[in-house]
């Protein structure tokens, strides 16, 4: 299987390269970057030295890339994928987009939250959260890989929403992200001194992952769900930690909550249920494709607190994209993604 | 003013020593430690070298310590202060307790959450959150210095509760603490490798600061308030960051929220109001006695999110204790606490 | 191939488990711990959840462990291995010791620096620095796996010593280690607050890795080499960084230095030569078995500065042990060790 | 005393502002920035909120700034100070330059290492390392404040060089710096992800602080000293740690070494001698003007290893500049610099 990475020099792009190099059935066809065309990727990222010696090309010749590839990963800022996918509409190549362009059933939602016009509003992609939409992904051509915050938040509460164990009103997701979630751009706020020994909320009441979480929650709840989503920046490299609050429906037992998680995720390779009263730790999933989920039930407040965490560059981006690739090409879902977390 | 520190070898104790050494009107009379009696404090904490050369004594001779002191700071695990304060009941020495023993108006609440019997249940201390209870602190003899999470959480929402701008039901405080908040005990979870590059929730639905926050919220709301409180451990040395969620009452304007904060805290030296839409950063208050407060109003969810942060060892412990001392002894409240935050 | 890990609960032990689980030809027979016998390893180390469900046994029944295993890894503090290897002298099982007991050709050197009597002084192990002693390792029964500082320091200067390009007098190795190098013991100096935002030298002029480095330097120089070795503690989880200083011999060209490295390491999978003027970065080798080496030549001082780095838990401990296992069992040397570094 | 800061938005500039705000005899007249003229400094640096409300002006009107000030601090990249000091030659204002322009007795040395022409080669400044050149600083008009690496390295070995206890050949300074040492510029290498969990050498055999250290060493040794200087980047905010190696002269006793340090630094407020066998830790001097010095003597190698550390933004920049100001204006040297280190 020949895979190309469009936008290989960002953190998600280079993580795709790392994972593809360890995938037994994939080979990397092309890697692109418009700002560093012609440069060796392993010069920008010396951790790849001796293992990957391709130079970056331009994505200008899209048809050529498509012909050289069975699958193309788009790891670009939003707004680019809709041009590329549109142009490749008649190609046989599979496309997995790691950006936001195709994540919404309703392109108006995209336009409202991303504040740009959608240039390919009639195309519908499959939402690539494999554990929830596996069957739809098989056989599709264009997969919208979910965001990092969203994967963590959605997986945390969907079992309870689906089983009507929680109320759909009043849900709060208080989420925390490692700094790679902010990308590799040169901003004062991304300097070591700005992040180290600090912590801050940002995008309160306005972060673009909000409607993406709401879309999945609504889908499984069977009704419109509006949530409060608050992201924060953590002083560490990798990781998403979502603390999710929901009011319990009437007469919900501890067992019903446990059973909802077990029945939905019991067979999932990448989801580890820690159970009631056991809180996940970011470090236990680092550099792996795992999602760890634990929860607590507070009878004083009649609320369930579900906590989930994942590595934003793996299950929150490149790993999930490879998982989607495996589904698209009928490979075992965990192929190339079995690496254990790095601890400590 | 002669000040003694009972329990000087913990993080709060040694921070008291640091701040007292910089206080123009205080001198340190005695520092105690039962496990390191006889040792030089500056040998355990070499950052004090050349500036503090007293040895640690035992707290066994309490009356002697009281006679040598105008004020005694208790920086001990809970359960000790109630013995000490009881024994010193007839002494003239002022006592500022940094632990939980005397923080509750109702000793039954203490017993329920701390799971020990209260040995001095008839004594009432003043709750030493100066910005809220200043007048009561003046002239008192025993001050219960608030906890770190609680100071941050209480200050964030009290102006809105007092002015009935938020509902008293459904309040959630999602809080994050630097590692010094967990003290200096030898546990696997406190090792560098356990904390670094990680993040976790703990004490969910059961943390002892919950009833302390509820007590102050209820006091200002004029009715019983039950909250959801979730603490997390941050990979950094110092800091409390509280993200507080409350449902807006009907017809509350942005201006009413801003006015509630301004009228209550406008004249406070140690509270900096960042305003609507500006989120505090932990690093901007490090090593200072400041509390930074910002907020956002979400009309989609009809909720206000108030975010506050402080240094858990300063405004969350030793700094607030000194502030209480200043009030008790009629000194300018900011004396010895004017150091600017250390940035970066 | 059945492998057992004696002392599986330390950082090196659990890293062995992680790597063995990813090794295509190995299966883990037994894992032991005297302090946690009977406990599930994945309960102490939840990153292993769903992937390893063996309980810890005692190492008391050594013969039983030997019969159940083709190879035994000893990940214990020094002083234990010499008892175990002695007891298993007549067993067929291969032993790879990650401690110091068998690293010295002369047991007197061990006794002098480790300050304990050697209980098995007549047994000689092979020194398991594969790149230098590969041929001797093949077919041996007892391998002394080198230390982390030593692997990094030895590989940095041996090519120059062997080719007489540097003087044997005046060598200085200024080395820095991530905190996992200090093990997982409960000490005040290992708490997060002690390490974070700090840095310190320790074991100056007395660290036990000194004679181990000297032994290899002397072996390749063909004469006795005495060095200055200074370790420091870095505020990060993993990594050894060795800055090595040596006086150039007369008339040594830049090319001769480059050629010495190339001829010795050009074919080595795990050594990446960055060349003159390119300094390694710790992060580029994290969680991998790579050693990155760069150097600079200073004509003002007539000195060469060779800088090497590696992950102390992988190439500096568990990874190198697996590499030794591969050599012992005639497997491709990189089997199970091909994972790319995790960046960032 | 009216003080102005030219270049107030870099880390050293804003640290000057912090320290001046806490100085009992200083008031800040003007703060300048060419890129942010007109902006409030406390908007860029919110830790100053409520305590400093001046806007940044341009340094174009130098004479105006000089008239409004008794002392001007220049916190600019090298190459600017020589223009400014030249232009203010006839003004009475005192100038303390934190850059490299005037640090060399021989402007040719500046030109060689900084690779720019010196525009004011006939002006000589006093080298502002107060502990060594106090008498010369008094009464001078232009002070060249030393660099951070240099202050740490010079103070470590000067007592031994002055007393001929070490050889002048073969000195190596292996130094490590927190990230603020690299300034606040937007470079990939300064991003959080590049620094965190990493470590690297840079500027090997070519760093500009080399000749500055050599100049002071030579001055006290009474002969030309050439050294090896190797800087490294530490994953922490603040701090310089210099591990200095020198060969002992013949027949030097432990006592002679201790006596050299004691006689030279015994009366210095800002130098804390830890003694033989005690290694400094970066955290013990954080945010203070202290220099901690310890040493070890290795009789195997006949070498002394002196280790010193300081906060690069305080004693290595702004604090030392204030110390110089105090000397220039006949104030107690520690005025405004007495704050204890922040620990942890």
Image (cartoon, coloured by chain):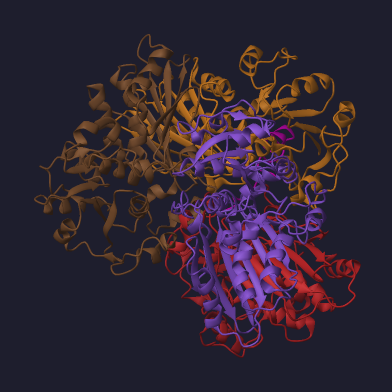
Chain colours: A purple, B red, C brown, D orange
Where the N terminus of chain B falls, by quadrant? bottom right
Q: Could you say where residue B184 lies in the image, as x and y percent from the top left?
A: 49, 63
Task: Classify residue B290 by image quadrant.
Answer: bottom right
Residue, x 64% and y 48% (percent of image)? A98
Does A122 sit above or below residue D124?
below
Percent position of residue C178, x then y: 44, 45
**Image-based side of A324 in relation to D166, left or right:** right
* Residue at image point 70% right, 45% down: A189
Q: Is A9 on the left or on the right of C294, as rendered?
A: right
In the rendered structure, the answer to whether residue B205 lies left or right of residue C119 reads: right
Camera-nearest residue between B92 and A155: A155
Residue drawn at point x = 44 percent, y = 34 percent: D306
Picture coordinates of residue B120, whole percent (x, y): 56, 88
Is C26 a magenta residue? no
User: In the image, which residues are magenta?
Assistant: D322-344
The answer to whether residue B206 shows anywhere in this view is no
């Amino acid at each position: 299987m020949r895979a190309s990475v469009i936008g290989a020099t960002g953190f998600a792009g280079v993580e795709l390269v790392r994972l593809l190099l360890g995938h037994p059935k994939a080979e990397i066809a092309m890697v692109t970057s418009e700002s560093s065309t012609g440069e060796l990727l392993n010069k920008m990222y010396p951790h790849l030295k001796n293992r990957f010696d391709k130079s970056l090309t331009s994505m200008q010749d899209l048809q050529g890339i498509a012909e050289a590839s069975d699958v193309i990963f788009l790891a670009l800022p939003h707004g680019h994928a809709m041009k590329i996918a549109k142009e490749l509409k008649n190609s046989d190549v599979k496309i997995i987009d790691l950006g936001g362009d195709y994540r919404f059933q309703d392109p108006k939602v995209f336009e409202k939250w991303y504040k740009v016009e959608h240039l390919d509003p009639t195309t519908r992609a499959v939402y690539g959260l494999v554990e929830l939409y596996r069957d739809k992904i098989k056989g599709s051509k264009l997969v919208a890989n979910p965001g990092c915050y969203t994967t963590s938040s959605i997986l945390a509460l969907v079992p309870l929403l689906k089983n009507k164990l929680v109320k759909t009103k009043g849900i709060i997701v208080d989420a925390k992200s490692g700094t790679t979630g902010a990308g590799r751009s040169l901003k004062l706020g991304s300097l070591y001194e700005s992040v180290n020994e600090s912590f801050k909320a940002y995008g309160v009441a306005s972060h673009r992952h909000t409607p993406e979480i709401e879309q999945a929650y609504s889908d499984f709840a069977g009704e419109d769900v509006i949530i409060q989503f608050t992201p924060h920046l953590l002083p560490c490299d990798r990781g998403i930690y979502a603390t999710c609050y929901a009011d319990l429906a009437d007469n919900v037992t501890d067992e019903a909550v446990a059973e909802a998680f077990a029945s939905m995720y019991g067979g999932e390779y990448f989801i580890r249920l820690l159970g009631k009263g056991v809180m996940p730790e970011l470090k236990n999933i680092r550099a792996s494709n795992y999602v760890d989920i634990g929860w607590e039930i507070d009878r004083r407040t009649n609320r369930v607190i579900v906590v989930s965490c994942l590595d934003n560059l793996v299950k929150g981006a490149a790993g999930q994209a490879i998982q989607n690739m495996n589904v698209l090409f009928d490979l075992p879902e965990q192929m190339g993604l079995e690496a254990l977390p790095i601890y400590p």
